[in-house]
Amino acid sequence: MSLVTLSINDKTIQAEEGTTIFEAAKQNNILIPHFCYLENVHQMGSCRICVVEVDGARNLMASCVTEVREGMVVHTNTSKVRKVRKVLYELILSDHPKNCLGCHRNQNCELQDLGEQIQIDGFRFEGVKSKDIVDSTSASIVRDSSKCILCRRCVTVCNEIQGVGVMNAHHRGFATFIGPSEDESLGHSICTNCGQCIVVCPVGALKEKDSTQLVWDALLDKSKTVIVQTAPAVRVALGEKFGFEPGTLVTGKMATSLRELGFNYVFDTNFAADLTILEEGSEFLKRVTETFTTAEPAVLPMITSCSPGWIKYVEHQYPNHLGHLSSCKSPHMMLGALIKTYFAEKINIDPKDIFVVSVMPCTAKKFEITRPEMESNGVRDVDAVLTTRELARMIKDAGIDFAQLPDSEFDSPLGLSSGAADIFGTTGGVMEAAIRTVYELVTGRELPMEALHVQPLVGLKQVKTADLKIENPVEAYSFLDGVTVKVAVTSGLKGASKLMEEIRLGTSPYHFIEVMGCPGGCISGGGQPRPVDDSVRMKRMQAIYREDEGKQLRKSHQNKDVMALYKDFLGHPLGHLSHELLHTTYVKRDKN
Amino acid sequence: MITHEEICSVHSMTEAEKYRVLEQVMDDYDRKENNLIQILHMAQAIFGYLPAEVQSFIAEKMDIPNSKVNSVLTFYSFFSTKPKGKYTVGICLGTACYVRGGKDVVNKLKEVLGCDVGETTDDKIFSLQVMRCIGACGLAPAMTINDKVYKQVNPNKLHRILGMLK
Ligand code: SF4
Ligand code: SF4
Ligand code: SF4
Ligand code: FES
């Protein structure tokens, strides 16, 4: 890479060729006001707030899309720039409702932040208001186009990063709106409910469908036993909503806050993550055994099924390849089913009087609980899903001083978990957890890797792969002696489509694949606190591995409460009751 | 390769035939997303307009989301998602035509035809649409009726022009 010399605000600086003016300025501590630009995601020049003056150029240039050139002379703060920036901001506001006090993004809105930077005296332009379509047909997402400022970040995320293509711009000029096609609503489209569009939306145009009221109602209903469970990725991000640094673990405070909110039992989805490893690991070994020892090979690669965004995606896009999916329900659905059967029996309460709430980093789980398959003995497995953001809102609303809370533990018997369950929250985690257990089952020895981590599967790369050579297996798996098991891990649906294309063409070399619908896995799910970028992802991921390494118990099959559950209730993995309560089926959906 | 003229010269096709021709057109264009605008153009010639069913047929056969097809076709005022009348009256509202009274022409037309922009009269004779600059700035304000261009349109003479067609 060659270096370019230029001047910004009379300072001579050097930047790598190909850098934008915006980035070069930032590297030199000049923060050019901007709006639609989002690092590593969206760089399209849609809003032009980031304009700068370049000597010799006739017009102002959008610095986030203009590359540096040798000898360039740039000014970021001339009176012309400031005037234009102001007018641009006023124009964005001209068709915006500006009802901040009644908006869920109040005090957490990038348009407000920009206003604080730019400072205007009043509203000079009152434009025609943009279309005010409120689309609440989706179980996961509400779209309010009156608040949309047409930055198109969601379009980039939905098309380029997720490869789904529901969010697009339609019509033009004042009539422009962003969403699925005119005749479609989100709830009836190929939207996967991943919520990645919500995470990048700078304003209040996209949000999760609110379930807080539903949960308040249940908490205040004396006839209900209200039971909550929390996903592994919530505890590494919830703190951000209360002023903690990204990557702060708040497991203990979270459990306390849930009790203060009035939940009768606080359980951990992690318990069911350990259970998932036993069910899914057994399913994998069954498929492998069939393939290697019978004339009827099972469907391989087997693919994980814990991410409901991924499930809906594959049902739409690859309806003829659903046999690759593990039949396991996602962990919180498993736990819901167990609470309303196993636990209901234990505490002697009619399952109809139990209300199960899942706190999830995920918006797709709001859709998942509405799937007709997700019930056991005629009662719904889970009654409400709160995102991490919604839980934070409830804690604030209840006047709980989160930062000062003492730590407490999850309740027994559905609260104990191993480190293997913790890492479900990050890309690569489910696979690593499965390998820790499956390797030991097959060879009788502990996975011979440092700190039990499968290093090639750690990190944010889109597709990660690992080879595991099996040597000296136990008697029952002697047919695997010398076999190299190939696994792949991907997060984000674009990566998933790459692996699915190989499967479609019959060239996939893998035996086992982990797919998470959101880039980075659940740590950056659609229900997590904003903002999310790669540095936030890395901090949350490190926290997840810290939680794992801090535990004595590191392997799912050593979770004594899970083992007790098999002994007292389920029988054995893939047994009859497991099949009824913990496994599910999938449906073919239209591609359009 | 089927040409636009050939399609326009055929007037009575059954629905099934129309979809067959459309598939042939998509094959001619290799079902490539880059050729979407040409394909939509031909589809509109075949069906007269582009209703939701035709859009999703194209999306499905070309393996792109509905939303993308809709995004492209709603961007261009040339495409219509509603059936068109026998005559399509188009008013240019590019800058030159706008400044020289295009807006008045639109208002007068709405009054005379009794339908809004983007709509068709009840008797299915006229459809009204506005266009972005059609490149006839010297003739502003310009109006088109099907393929014919009318120059320097006087709102008060619209009655006569339209009456002659009826
Ligand atoms: S999106 Fe932001 S600026 Fe707009 S109403 Fe909501 S809080 Fe206010
Ligand atoms: S939830 Fe995901 S799939 Fe649906 S519109 Fe948003 S980004 Fe696209
Ligand atoms: S919905 Fe949000 S992210 Fe999408 S274009 Fe509108 S403001 Fe931008
Ligand atoms: S921030 Fe550069 S164009 Fe929007």
Image (cartoon, coloured by chain):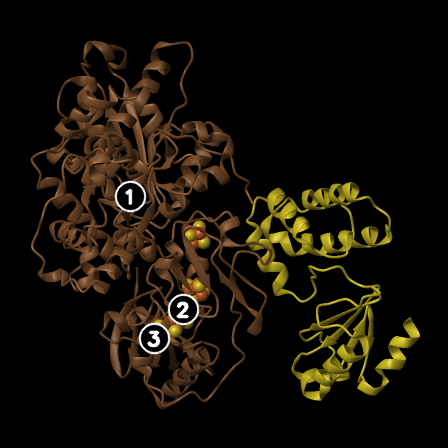
Q: Chain of mark 3?
A: A
Q: Which residue is mark 3?
A: A101
Mark 2 neighbour class, 10 Å CA radius: few under 14, some 14 to 19, many 20 or more:
many
* Chain B palette colour: yellow
Task: State the image quarter where residue B160 is shown.
Answer: bottom right
Q: Residue B30 in the image: state x and y as whole percent.
A: 64, 44
* Chain A palette colour: brown
Q: CA distance from mark 2 to mark 1?
A: 48 Å
Residue at the spot 74% in from the left edge and 76% down from the top edge: B91
Q: Which residue is mark 2?
A: A65
Identify the disc placed on residue A132.
Answer: none
Give the residue type that dot 2 points to.
Val
Check whether the beta carbons of the residues at disc 2 and disc 1 lie within 8 A of each other.
Answer: no
Residue at the spot 67% in from the left edge and 79% down from the top edge: B94
Quadrant of the snapshot with the C terminus of chain A: top right
Give the residue type that dot 1 points to.
Val
Q: Residue B66 in the image: state x and y as whole percent.
A: 57, 51
Note whether A419 is above or below A129 in the view shown: above
Give the residue type that dot 3 points to.
Leu
Q: Residue A160 in the image: state x and y as whole percent.
A: 44, 53
State whether label 2 is within 8 Å of ligand 4. Answer: yes
Residue A33, visible in the rendered structure = no
Q: Which residue is mark 1?
A: A356
Q: Nearer the viewer, residue B16 or A416?
A: A416
Q: Kindly state the secondary structure of the residue where label 2 is placed.
A: loop
